[in-house]
Image (cartoon, rainbow, N blue to C red):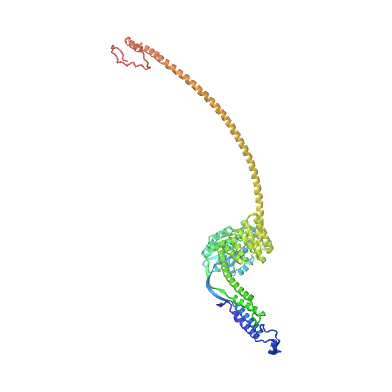
Amino acid sequence: MRFLHIEFIYFMLPPLVILFAFLLTQKESQTTFFSEEVMQKLRVSANSLTLQARNALFFLVGLLVIIALAGPVIDYAEVEVKQKSSNILLALDISDSMLAQDIYPTRLEAAKKKALAFLKKEQSERIGVIAFAKNSYLVSPLSFDHSAVAFLLQDLNTNSITEKGTNFLSMLEVVNNATKDKQKYVVLFSDGGDKKDFSREISYAKEHNIMVFVLAVATKKGAPIRLANGEFIKQNGQIIVTKLNSAIVSLATQTGGAYIQSVASLKDVDALLGEIKKRVKQKQLQSEKIKQYFPLFYYPLGLALFIFLLATSSMSKRQSVEVPSAFLLFALLFASTQNAQALSFLGFKQLKEAKEAYEKGEYNYAAQVYKEYAQDNHSKEAYFDAANSFYKAKKYDKALQMYEMARFNTKAKEALRYANMGNAYVKKGTKKDLLEAIQKYETSLKLQKDAEVQKNLEAVKKALEQKKKDQKQQDKKNQQQKKQNNKDSKEQKKNQQNKKQSQKDSQNKKNEQNKKDNQKQNAQQKQQQQNKQQDKAQNAHAKKTKPKQEQKQLQNQAFTQAKKMSDMEQKKWLKELQKKSSSYIYRLNSKPIQKGLDNEKPW
């Protein structure tokens, strides 16, 4: 066992001993006037505690309280804690172009707000601040004291540096001189200036291992630059309109960093932190061994309370007095302290696990652990942390349930709770949810004024108005579409009827044409049959008349031929022709040729 604060024993115990030494030796005031025998007769009862006995009990109570304040503990484990961190410089552009009001209220004020949010969210890194325009200056060296860095950052304005212009190369030189790390990181809050070629800056950053992250605080539309006296900056009599210089993207991407466009909410800061965690390498700064222990202060404190009750009571010295209530109180106190110790240790472990899970992005697990701890310990803060975890996990209904359970007594915390509830309703996105979000934002602003909540409220109102306009346009469009559909339906129905009638007429015409074609075809078939019969009759007649005609023709030819023959030949020829033959072909050489006269011609 050891004492965490043993100085309480050194400095408080000696005065206590001296004080009670006088008290314990003090006599009753009556003894200065009366003897002990007289006092014995004058006392009504001798059963109560004497003054010395009471003082002794009070001395024991004081001694036990001092021991409890000294913090007695029993060590049970030793844990080595390693601290890792990286050095990050924030470079804030404070040139006159940052006075443009295309981002509310000005680019510079918006950039400072983003930088302060970055400081609040990033607690584990050493952070410094650089302000630059034409020249650059170190505003705050690298430090873990983010509150001090934020204090120095809040007072920056365009009057801090008198030179006009924007020189990114001088800013990189200050970054290079501000830290001796091998790899250097800078987060640049700027509108990009008016330079189109960043080749020199990129070359310098690569040469000195500087990784640049750019959060662009400007719009492409731009705005004029209003000075403190209300006048606009002019050039050649014309008002200058400064816009976002998109060429600065190359400075971020080509040095290994990231480029992020600023938005009205803090999502751009969250995105920036995510990119930094991906690219920045942390180095070990120091390690420390921490002893874990069980505190024992409640034992002497409980015993001191019990003795104090005995000392202030009117219990008798000789008669036995039942004091079950006192012992019961002591037993309850002892049991409660044991339970409190166990719950305290387990609760600390739960909260540590939940916090680590939240930082790693395991929001569902963190939310579940926070919820269980809150239900077991009725902790409003744990309910609030569980709600934030559910919100990060995009489970907005569960987040709203947890926010309802986390009701605080302070206006600041209640305002924050209502603001977060408004954010959750906005994420749900329906018209009803947007109305709820407006109500929560207004309640938050009544409790505590906050510019970010006011912006969110105005943005939600605009979104709701736009949604109403879109709904009206959609309803109008639907009505027009409905009318057009009805019109098209009528025309389609009419066209179908006309089509049916046309098909019917066409079918009737077709049927009539088919009927005519059939009649015509029948007539043609009948005519063909008649023609066939006529041809058949003609053929039969031709068969009968043809042999006679051919025979007659042959005879004519024979007579013609016979004129040229001799008498002997003519007789033979005619004799052959006069023979009866049933065929149409006459074989005149069926018999061998007979020899005749010498002048006979062969045939």
Query: Toward the viewer: 303 or 45?
Result: 45
Query: Toward the viewer: 452 or 206?
Result: 452
Which residue occupies 64% across, 39% down? 490
- Is residue 327 visible in the rendered structure shown here? yes
Which residue occupies 63% across, 54% down? 430
**Relative to 12, does residue 116 appear above or below in the rendering?**
above
Residue 24 screen position, x and y as percent: 64, 85
Residue 484 sits in which quadrant?
top right
Residue 514 screen position, x and y as percent: 55, 28
Residue 231 sits in which quadrant?
bottom right
**Relative to 44, does residue 591 appear above or below in the rendering?**
above
Query: Toward the viewer: 537 or 566?
Result: 537
Residue 181 screen position, x and y as percent: 52, 68
- Which residue occupies the extreme front position in the image? 319
- Is residue 241 visible in the rendered structure shown here? no
Residue 529 screen position, x and y as percent: 49, 22
Which quadrant does the N terminus fall into?
bottom right
Residue 586 sits in which quadrant?
top left
